[in-house]
Image (spheres, helix red, strand yellow):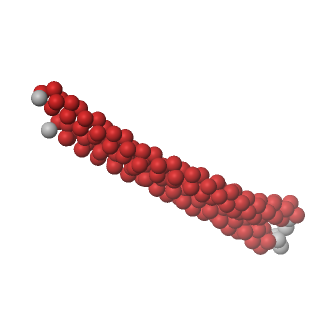
Amino acid sequence: TALMQLVEVHKEIHAQQTNILKAFYVDLLLPLESNLEKDTKVVAGEHKRFLQQHKSHHDSYQKALSMCKKQKKRTRSSLFTIGKDVKQLHAMEDEKKKLDGFCDQSLKQAITQERRRYGFVLERQCSLAKHYLAYHTKVSA
């Protein structure tokens, strides 16, 4: 009978370990794989969109910068064109602010998305840790 009890306990431990392995597969691997496939497509699209918008903002800034430089070359010391110089300088500063604002906003969005992804993995790991805790609690009891 002691041998039968030992076999029974061993079967129960094996069943619990199998359940943990299934939980690992179902709770972590499958969702991680599906999210990875979706996120790969989303990130590629977001990256392409970012590059296009950044190029647009950067081109606007470069255009304003070149206009400012041209204006300076034309009017080295003329007092009558100071207003145009100031106007070009303000336009260049506005474009720089737009570019910097776009970069800041893009970084915030990227960090938010990264945090969401890490949160997902952490949530799944916690779920798996609960399975391990239940297993070890049951074994030690």
The image quadrant where one finds the N terminus is top left
Q: Is residue 76 visible?
A: no
Instruction: Compare residues 1 and 117 and report the one nearer the observer.
Output: 1
Give coordinates of residue 59: x percent, y percent. Answer: 76, 61
Q: Is residue 8 visible?
A: yes
The residue most toward the top is: 3
Residue 109 as seen in the image, left or right of residue 136: right
Q: Residue at x 19, y 41 (%)?
A: 138
Instruction: Compare residues 52 and 134 and report the one nearer the observer.
Output: 134
Instruction: Compare residues 75 and 129 and report the one nearer the observer.
Output: 129
Residue 81 as seen in the image, left or right of residue 42: right
User: Picture quarter containing residue 50?
Assistant: bottom right
Q: Residue at x 38, y 51 (%)?
A: 123
Give coordinates of residue 20: x percent, y percent. Answer: 33, 42
Q: Residue at x 43, y 53 (%)?
A: 120
Give coordinates of residue 107: x percent, y percent. Answer: 56, 56
> Can you say whether 81 is above or below 63 in the image?
below
Give coordinates of residue 9: x percent, y percent. Answer: 20, 34
Q: How many marks?
A: 0
Residue 29 as seen in the image, left or right of residue 3: right
